Amino acid sequence: MFENIFRLDGKIAVVTGAGNGLGRSFALGLAAFGATVICADKNLAGADETASLVKQSQGKAKPLQVDVGDEASVDDIWQKIAADYRRIDIVVNNAGIATNTPRTHEYNVADWDRVMAVNLRGVFLTTRKALTLMLPGPGSIINLSSIMGLRGYFPDFAAMSISYSTSKAGIIGFTRQVAAEYAKEKIRVNAIAPGWHGGTALGAERRSAAGPEGSKKFEEAIHARIPMKHRGVPDDLIGLVVYLASDASHYVTGQVIAHDGGWDAMVV
């Protein structure tokens, strides 16, 4: 009865931001449990590399190019998905960006708009189209929030931008509203709030602006704050993504699950 509870055989999954980092791990993990994975990314070369890695592991995958913040680009990719697959079962809204991290009074409007376009507008545009291919259900939508959407953090220097934190908090509200709207159709919508996971390109702008000394200061501050005393890595999240995508979580919707080495549990 329970041996296949995590299997995804016959399921069609879409992972945005699949060209590297967390998205690549999610695509590989979902494929390992039997899903056919559409690897979507603005960087088509990265998406193609991820799809190739899936196929090397005897999985099924297809790369597609998309700019999740651009409505026309999103419409185009979902027309292709509809033509090729007719329906989908799983969406992982993983695509996201971060900028350098001045404090709020120094933060510029262009960077605010750039982050919101990808991190929040992109989740809306993708989910809106995905729902049309999930209905009448069931299905699973997994949104990537962040611990920065749950709590503020300021270790006497700006560790994350106001736009990133705000966008990730917005994803939580978005997740819960969509979960409420589509629960009757058994379309489950949940969010993961990762902590400080290494092995991704997300902090590239911050690292570049901070330089070696600033980056060292940042690493020391977050390691001291994490109860487990180390960062996570992208593969650490695969089990949670497979759980939320599979029948193992068939009665779970509207939830936000922190994956952070104990960060959100500790009072400082």
Image (cartoon, rainbow, N blue to C red):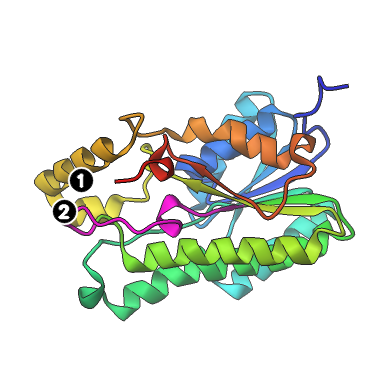
Residue at 30%, 30% in the rendered image: 229
Whether residue 68 is visible here, answered yes or no, is no
Residue at 43%, 51% in the rendered image: 147
Q: Position of residue 95 (x, y in %)?
A: 51, 55
Q: Quadrant of the N terminus?
A: top right
Q: Nearer the viewer, residue 68 or 108?
A: 108
Residue placed under numbered mark 1 in the picture: 218
Q: Nearer the viewer, residue 149 or 208?
A: 149
Q: Are marks 1 and 2 in contact (CB under 8 Å)?
A: yes
Q: Position of residue 189 (x, y in %)?
A: 70, 54
Residue at 35%, 59% in the rendered image: 152
Task: Identify the secondary structure beneath mark 2.
Answer: helix
Amino acid type indicated by mark 2: Ala
Extreme-bottom residue of the structure: 109
Q: Quadrant of residue 130?
A: bottom right
**Residue 249 disc label:** none
Residue placed under numbered mark 2 in the picture: 210
Q: Position of residue 207 (x, y in %)?
A: 22, 50
Q: Nearer the viewer, residue 222 or 91?
A: 222
Q: Position of residue 256 (x, y in %)?
A: 58, 51
Magenta segment boundaries in residue numbering: 143-158
- Of helix, strand and loop, which mostly describes the magenta segment? loop
Amino acid type indicated by mark 1: Phe
- For label 2, the crowd category at 10 Å Cα-Cα, with few meaning under 14, some 14 to 19 and many 20 or more, is some
24 vs 77: above or below = above
Whether residue 231 is visible here, answered yes or no, is yes
Query: If you read the primary sequence from the N terminus, does the residue marked by circle 1 or circle 2 appear first?
Result: 2
Examine the structure image and report whether residue 151 is included in the region drawn in magenta: yes
Q: Nearer the viewer, residue 83 or 248?
A: 248
Residue at 79%, 44% in the rendered image: 251
122 vs 231, left or right, is right
